[in-house]
Image (cartoon, rainbow, N blue to C red):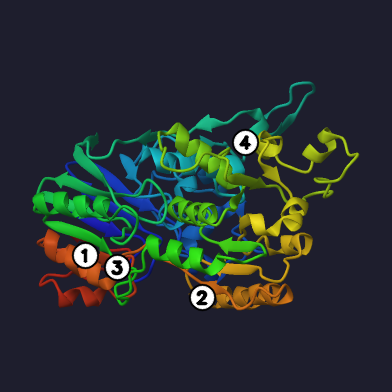
Amino acid sequence: MTSLSFYGGVGKIGGNKILLEDKGTRILLDFGMNFEEQASYFTEFMPPRKFSSIKDLIALGMLPDLKGIYRRDYCKHNGLNYSERNSVDGVLISHAHLDHLGYVHFLRRDIPVHVSPESKAIMSLFDTVGGGAYNDFCKFNPSFIFIPKKRSDGVKRRTARDGLEERVVNDFSFNKPFKIGNLEVTPYRVDHSLPGAAGFVINTSIGNVIYTGDLRFHGRHKDWSDYFVEKAAESEPVCMLSEGTRIKDSSARTEGYVEKQSTKLIKDKKGVVIANFPIRDTDRLLTFYKTAVSNNRSLVIESRQALLLDLLRLEGVTELPASDDEFIKIFFPRKGWGLIGRTGVPEEQVARDYKSWEKEYLNQSNVVTAGDISKNQGKYVVFMNYFQLNNLLDIQPVPGSVHIRSICEPFSEEMELDEKRINNWLRKFNLYPQNKIHASGHASGNHLFKMVESINPKLLIPIHTEFPELYKEVHKKVKLVNEGKKYQL
């Protein structure tokens, strides 16, 4: 029998965790974090307790209580039973946003994770730059293990310095079928707000099952999503799992709109341009790169973005600017002792303010400091998210400077509180009001309805949406599912 069990992404946006079972094979479709659930219990200052994380997250309903899928080092430390054998044959990741990928950290190292090459590059980025307790996407750092001391009796705690292991991560090729256990999966590129997003056709014993992941039809690569729809329709699916993030929204502003409006806004401006856009959205990075170049400016990115560009280039992505492009600058803000930009300070002392991976970029010829930007504000479009606004104290924007907000609107109480703090910074430096120029990474309702009508599955199951019932307007057989339940197809 073919079945689907839903452990996330039901009646809400994000946190997709879906178990497909057929032919003796079990596949997890994504294994993501739901940000709203996370914020309901935890904050930056009270994160999940690492020593009891799996046990705690299961108790709170944020991880499914499934045997044989979680990493053994955590299970043993948490006092949880674990199996010597995997209970799933693989994890199929649609794309590398954390609401689809974020809980992979907790999975066993030997469960194969199947991703696109671009998604693997982003996972490597997470592993390299850190920024949280739960990375371990490609690399694997065994935890809660004592090992013998080398130079004396007794034991010590094992750390990353004692060596990392590799998670089993397999990168697939688009449009080429591959096997997970007894099931055949064909991945297709779709357009979304970061590189490497995929939709899937999964061949089961009762027919094909479609999993859309997240997608849009108004980005730079509409043709990718159109081709996926074409191939999905040809497969005559028995079931389709469809995202519906923006099912109530009819607007579909394009990347071309963002580029045109941003170019128009900053034309003839004398000051610095501050732009906030999703840090891993390389389409939006390319948009602001083109906007900068057309206004005789350079785009200033941060070192994490430079690393991402390099990792993607290693995977064959060449349509993006290189990290050392003539119109790309890499911003190194003051950290630690704040020594960068000071004269008479030894280079090795400046370098101590930065992490080892950052030092790889520190001496590139296109590095700029806050002082460099401050002296030549008309030359730059500067990426700056809301965790970096304190750098405005060093840049001191002159009259004629502007701020462009190219991210989604706040959708939680916590984000609304952040918004007030953000606006305080912008008012302080005469960058308020925000110039809101954005294009969503998700398809509009009109496009979603057209997709469903084109593919015409026998059964439609809405996921990743707060309004699943709206699909009943365009499809005669819509199944509204509940979290934690198994459904036979």
Three-letter code, disc 2? Ser
Three-letter code, disc 1? Ile
Q: Can residue 436 be seen in the rendering of this structure?
A: yes
CA gap, disc 1 to disc 3? 10 Å
Three-letter code, disc 3? Gly
| Residue at the outermost front position | 268
> To which quarter of the image does residue 367 belong?
top right
Circle 4: is it few (<14), some (14-19), or many (20+) Cα within 10 Å?
some
Of circles 1 and 3, which is in front? 3
> Dot 3 corresponds to which residue?
244
Three-letter code, disc 4? Ile
Residue placed most toward the observer, 486 or 252: 252
Residue drawn at x 58%, y 40% as measured from the top left? 128
Of the numbered discs 1 and 2, the one sitting upstream in the chain is 2
Circle 2: is it few (<14), some (14-19), or many (20+) Cα within 10 Å?
few
Q: Where is residue 359 in the image (x, y as percent from the top left)?
A: 70, 36
